Amino acid sequence: MNRFIVISALLMATACASDRTKPDQSFVIHTIGDSTMAEKRDDRRPETGWGECIARHLRPDAAVSVRNHAVNGRSTKSFIAEGRWDSVLDSLRPGDYVFIQFGHNDNKPEDSTRFTNASTIYRENLRRYVNDTRARKATPVLLTSIVRRHFNESGVLVDTHGGYPDAMRQVAAELGVTLVDAQLLTEKLVLALGPDSSRSLYMHLAPTDSPNYPDGRADDTHLKTAGAERVAALIINDLKTRDARLAAVFE
């Protein structure tokens, strides 16, 4: 056999083998969660969910899209009860990702449609999200809730999430799920800015700032656009250190 033909065949076989082992970078990132992640209506601006900002950090050549399924006011319980999780599952394909961030509304004992016990049902729901995602050959990512800007009179940032972040951390460890500790990341950010400057991240508005809020607003839970951008960047940078496939598609 001609030596050139043999070498060409070997090179082609090597190239094909390389293609087979190269990870597929075409997938969808699905986000499920509450108002801190959700896309906002025009009449709520400048309120912005950090999930709206993910796509802006994708590489221009990345064959990846983001579908934000997060909805204001939802908990792990109500998101399932309303059929929203089933809808996400119907659209989930092998290789996709699901970013899961709940906790703000699970911690509302005055509302039986949303409240879950952090030690029991909350964990059970998180396990369901993880196991259902994996059953579709997709990848779950758990994210603790972003911090509320709740400083006391002494300038101490006071926790408002109770046992929910720790419950999520434990489920992530138990099931071997990638965890982004968004509570820790955003706590560091808010502490670095301090009680006054950290208002720039959240929905603190004077009456003249936005026609949507003629009386102004003082909201320490929800983010303005600048805050959502900073939080999304923190989360993405953390994810890039934890997941090589995501690191390859984010700038």
Image (cartoon, grey):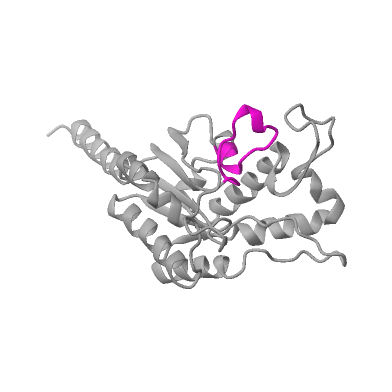
Q: Quadrant of the N terminus?
A: top left
**Residue drawn at 20 percent across, 35 percent down:** 3
| Image spot of residue 88 (x, y percent) | 37, 43
**Residue drawn at 54 percent across, 41 percent down:** 250
Q: Is residue 41 above or below residue 223?
A: above
Q: Is residue 13 above or below residue 187?
A: above
* Residue 235 seen by the camera: yes
| Image spot of residue 10 (x, y percent) | 23, 40
**Of the pair 220 and 52, the residue shown nearer to us:** 220
In this picture, residue 96 sits left or right of residue 1? right
Q: Is residue 17 above or below residue 2?
A: below
**Of the pair 60 and 152, the residue shown nearer to us:** 152
| Image spot of residue 100 (x, y percent) | 48, 52
Q: Quadrant of residue 38?
A: top right
Q: Which residues are magenta?
A: 35-54
In this picture, residue 57 sits left or right of residue 70? right
Is residue 49 part of the magenta span, yes or no?
yes
Mainly helix, strand or loop, the magenta region?
loop
**Of the pair 213 and 147, the residue shown nearer to us:** 213
Is residue 102 part of the magenta span, yes or no?
no
Q: Residue furthest left?
A: 1
In this picture, residue 45 sits left or right of residue 119? right
Q: Quadrant of the C terminus?
A: top right
* Residue 96 seen by the camera: no
| Image spot of residue 174 (x, y percent) | 42, 71
**Residue drawn at 41 percent across, 61 percent down:** 125
Q: Is residue 228 above or below residue 133?
A: above
- Please state the total of marks drawn on the protein image: 0
